[in-house]
Amino acid sequence: MKRWLVLKRKDTHMRLQGKRIATLVAEGVEDLEFYVPLMRLQEEGAQVLTAALDLKSIHGKNGLEIKPDTKIESLDADDLFALIVPGGWAPDKLRRHSVVKELVRGMDSKGKTIGVICHGGLIAISAGIMKGRRATGSLGIKDDILNAGGIWVDEAAFREGNLVWGRVVADIPDFCRELVEALVEKLEESAAAAQ
């Protein structure tokens, strides 16, 4: 039985091999909402880029150091498979920059997967992609979601079209499961369409 389990895991491992996914960060990003999805996507073989406004090291909300790989301004929605927006204090800082909002709108208009957790929803709100869509996040942004025309849902994690939503740190396992499932399905849909 152990042999079957090892073979089964090997069959499903690295399903996102070589897919470029960017994660948006700034000073005060929620450390776990950044690092756990990053590692989960790397485990699937994805090339995960840490993107910030500049290349200076930043610190997460809980003190962990993060070294950006690239500037947000150098990202192009056409070149990315998905985008991840972790929470913490970073989204409130990033949402003020047009380059961030343009990237999110570009990803959304192309139907590309955008994973949003906790306060990350502030960026989706500022990008203007909330109207009529279900969303979740920290209770602290419930009114913001509603005022942006979104529909508040108090669930750990779920999909709404191309958006994958996670509520808070405690829901990271559910968020990662939903995110990886959405990305693998998107990959399978692309492969089927190419045949």
Image: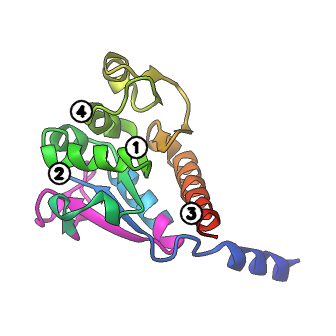
> Tag on residue 21?
none
Mark closer to the chain start, 2 or 3:
2
Q: Nearer the viewer, residue 34 or 126?
A: 126
First in sequence: mark 3 or mark 4? 4
Q: Residue furthest right?
A: 1
Kindly check if marks 2 and 1 are in contact, taking CB atoms under 8 A apart as contact: no
Query: Circles 4 and 1: CB distance less than 8 Å?
Result: no
Q: Nearer the viewer, mark 3 or mark 1?
A: 3
Amino acid type for the residue under numbered disc 2:
Glu
Residue 109: give x, y in percent of width and height.
36, 44
- List the residue tagged with mark 3: 190
The C terminus lies in quadrant: bottom right
Please tell me which residue is depicted at 50% across the width and 48% down the height of the picture. Answer: 172
Q: Nearer the viewer, mark 2 or mark 3?
A: 3
Q: CA distance from mark 3 to mark 4?
A: 29 Å
Say which amino acid is labelled 4. Ser
Residue at disc 1, secondary structure: strand
Dot 4, crowdedness within 10 Å: few (<14), some or many (≥20)? many
Mark 3 to mark 1: distance in Å? 22 Å
Mark 2 falls on what kind of element?
A: loop
- Mark 1 sits on what residue? 116
For the residues labelled 3 and 1, say whether their Cβ atoms are less than 8 Å apart.
Answer: no
Q: Give the residue number, with chain letter if any, for mark 2.
A: 27
Contact (Cβ within 8 Å) of mark 2 with mark 3? no
- Image coordinates of residue 35 in percent, x first then y, are 38, 60
Instruction: Tell me if residue 64 is in the magenta stretch.
Output: yes
Give the distance between the C-alpha atoms of the residues marked 4 and 1, in whole angstroms. Answer: 13 Å
Location of mark 4 (residue): 126
